[in-house]
Image: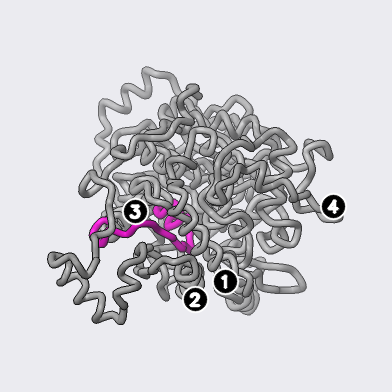
């Protein structure tokens, strides 16, 4: 990375509605022009003394659409108490928060960008001096960090917390197990009663998925990148201590306001390297490769897929977390939480300790009193069993993905997979094949037209891979897509393939039976046909726009 990549970005970079930094309108009683604004505030019970204090926006993605969002309103009240205790006037508002809970899934880019834009619009319209964001899924966490970077006002992000696991047959289960149970049921290896029991037991509490899925991955990112209160990312949603962290977030944002510490002081090039590093170290979700470049763009920093791949290659995997591992976020919390994992990363040389955080101190200073506990198997120290946790995440390139792709490599027998293409223009069509076990070992499910234009909005793809895992085919059958990989996937899965099918990318030219080579060690994904055949196919293929609404396969 360039030496100046860590420099503070310019405030005008990134899309905005006005291009100016918002400022709270003077509501002084001496201002005749502000009388209409004061009148509206009096209507909501504010006093003139409250109007004289800094207004702090407290935005949540609370809704009744997802368990990840359901606890946010409660935590927002604690944030507001913290703001008031530190001399500010909190103003709560909400934004949308889609998730995989929806019957139609989630379009990652559409919802993310809509959330970021809506927050910017609200903050600019009301001239808030600072911002605290509470989010319950990976997309909304990314969106709020984008908005904070774009506005460049003193800001703190807070994750709503992970769900607790359910119990079934004396083992912990999560939403991942439900997806996999769908495949097992189709294969006849579990009964209808088994499926119903798993379904009703898997999600016993509020909170996002209980593993290091998309939400918890981006929560870890929010803490290591410096925008979250240390220790807040890994605490499960039902725990009362979350309200203590929320109160501290309110106090912290007022301290940032007093000290004029802004997101772009924190979000440097090295901070983004730290973010990519914790994704790899925790065995997290591939969606981070979609969101980190977008957040960096808001800061005027170029942090692309190549940069992420470079960090991933040099970062050891230090935590054994699901979906590709064994343990859950609750177990990570019991083993010291995100700070303990960060301590292990710092010890391993996988973290830039000098980066600034919302505490006003550096990462290294925040971690001075933190140790990696012994007597557990969740986090390993850098000098113990160095090959115990296999690398999970890779960035690939090749003639099938000239603009790059991301891969999860769980359950690979070796680091190279060669298989036959099975092509689908929707995930539903691929799911129908898996439901009838209509595949063979060595097949590669090619699920295309799921990207930014084809989805539209980059659909989350995960049901096929999860069902395959539930049928015991993880590592023996691969899934590749130009969509976004869901955080619950495990196995050999390649996502974010670019260019996408809808714009004529090579994935649109793949035909059933073609040989696809996935080489994790070499960082390659290739279609095993020559350039002349590719050119001939391109000449007679029109990519068109096959979306989830138009596909009839």
Q: Are marks 3 and 1 in contact (CB under 8 Å)?
A: no
For disc 2, the marked residue is 74
Furthest residue in direction left, as rendered: 33
- Point out residue 245 in the picture as x, y percentages from the top left corner: 58, 65
Q: Name the disc covering residue 243, or none.
A: 1
For the residue pair 406 and 44, the one nearer the viewer reads as: 44
- Name the element at disc 4: loop
- Please name the residue shown 46% across and 24% down the image: 4
**Looking at the image, is mark 1 or mark 4 earlier in the sequence?**
1
Q: Which of marks 4 and 2 is in front?
A: 2
Instruction: Please tell me which residue lies in front, 477 or 76.
Output: 76
Question: Mark 3 or mark 1: which comes first in sequence?
Answer: 3
Residue drawn at 13 percent across, 67 percent down: 32
For residue 439, above or below residue 506: below
The quadrant where residue 144 appears:
bottom left
Q: Where is residue 27 in the image (x, y as percent from the top left)?
A: 24, 66
Mark linked to residue 116: 3
Q: Left or right of 492: which side holds 254?
A: left
């Amino acid at each position: 990375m360039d030496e100046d990549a860590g420099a503070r970005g310019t405030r005008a970079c990134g899309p905005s509605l006005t291009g100016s930094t918002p400022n709270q309108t003077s509501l002084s009683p001496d201002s005749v022009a502000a009388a209409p604004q004061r009148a509206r505030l009096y209507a909501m019970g504010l006093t003139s003394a409250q109007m004289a204090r800094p207004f702090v926006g407290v935005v949540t993605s609370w809704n009744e659409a997802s368990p990840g969002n359901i606890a946010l309103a409660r935590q927002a009240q604690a944030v507001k108490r913290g703001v008031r205790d530190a001399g500010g006037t909190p103003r709560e508002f909400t934004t949308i928060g889609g998730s995989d809970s929806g019957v139609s899934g989630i379009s990652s880019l559409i919802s993310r960008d809509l959330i970021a834009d809506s927050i910017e619009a609200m903050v600019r319209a009301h001239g808030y001096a600072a911002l605290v964001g509470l989010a319950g899924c990976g997309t909304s966490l990314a969106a709020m960090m984008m908005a904070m970077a774009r506005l460049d006002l003193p800001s703190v992000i807070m994750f709503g917390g992970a769900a607790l696991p359910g119990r079934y047959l004396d083992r912990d289960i999560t939403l991942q197990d439900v997806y996999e149970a769908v495949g097992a049921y189709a294969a006849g290896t579990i009964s209808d009663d088994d499926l119903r029991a798993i379904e009703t037991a898997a999600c016993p509490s509020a909170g996002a998925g209980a593993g290091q899925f998309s939400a918890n991955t981006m929560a870890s990112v929010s803490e290591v990148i410096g925008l979250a209160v240390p220790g807040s990312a890994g605490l499960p949603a039902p725990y009362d201590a979350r309200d203590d962290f929320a109160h501290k977030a309110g106090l912290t944002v007022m301290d940032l306001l007093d000290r004029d510490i802004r997101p772009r002081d924190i979000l440097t090039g090295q901070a983004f390297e730290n973010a990519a590093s914790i994704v790899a170290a925790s065995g997290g979700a591939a969606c981070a490769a979609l969101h980190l470049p977008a957040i960096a763009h808001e800061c005027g920093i170029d942090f692309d897929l190549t940069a992420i791949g470079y960090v991933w290659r040099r970062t050891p995997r230090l935590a054994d977390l699901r979906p590709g591992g064994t343990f859950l976020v609750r177990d990570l919390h019991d083993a010291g939480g995100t700070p303990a994992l960060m301590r292990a990363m710092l010890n391993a040389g996988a973290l830039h300790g000098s980066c600034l955080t919302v505490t006003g101190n550096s990462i290294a200073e925040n971690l001075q009193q933190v140790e990696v506990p012994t007597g557990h198997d969740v986090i390993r120290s850098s000098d113990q069993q160095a090959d115990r946790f296999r690398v999970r995440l890779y960035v690939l390139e090749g003639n099938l993905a000239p603009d790059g792709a991301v891969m999860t490599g769980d359950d690979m027998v070796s680091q190279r997979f060669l298989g036959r293409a099975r092509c689908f223009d929707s995930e539903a069509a691929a799911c129908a094949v898996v439901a009838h076990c209509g595949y063979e070992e060595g097949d590669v499910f090619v699920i295309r037209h799921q990207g930014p234009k084809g989805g539209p909005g980059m659909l989350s793809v995960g049901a096929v891979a999860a069902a395959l895992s539930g049928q015991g085919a993880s590592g023996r059958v691969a899934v590749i897509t130009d969509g976004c990989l869901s955080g619950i996937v495990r196995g050999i899965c390649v996502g974010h393939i670019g260019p996408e099918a809808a714009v004529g990318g090579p994935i649109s030219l793949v035909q059933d039976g073609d040989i696809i080579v996935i080489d994790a060690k070499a960082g390659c994904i290739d279609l095993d046909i020559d350039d002349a055949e590719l050119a001939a196919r391109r000449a007679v293929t029109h990519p068109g726009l096959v979306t989830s609404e138009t596909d009839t396969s």
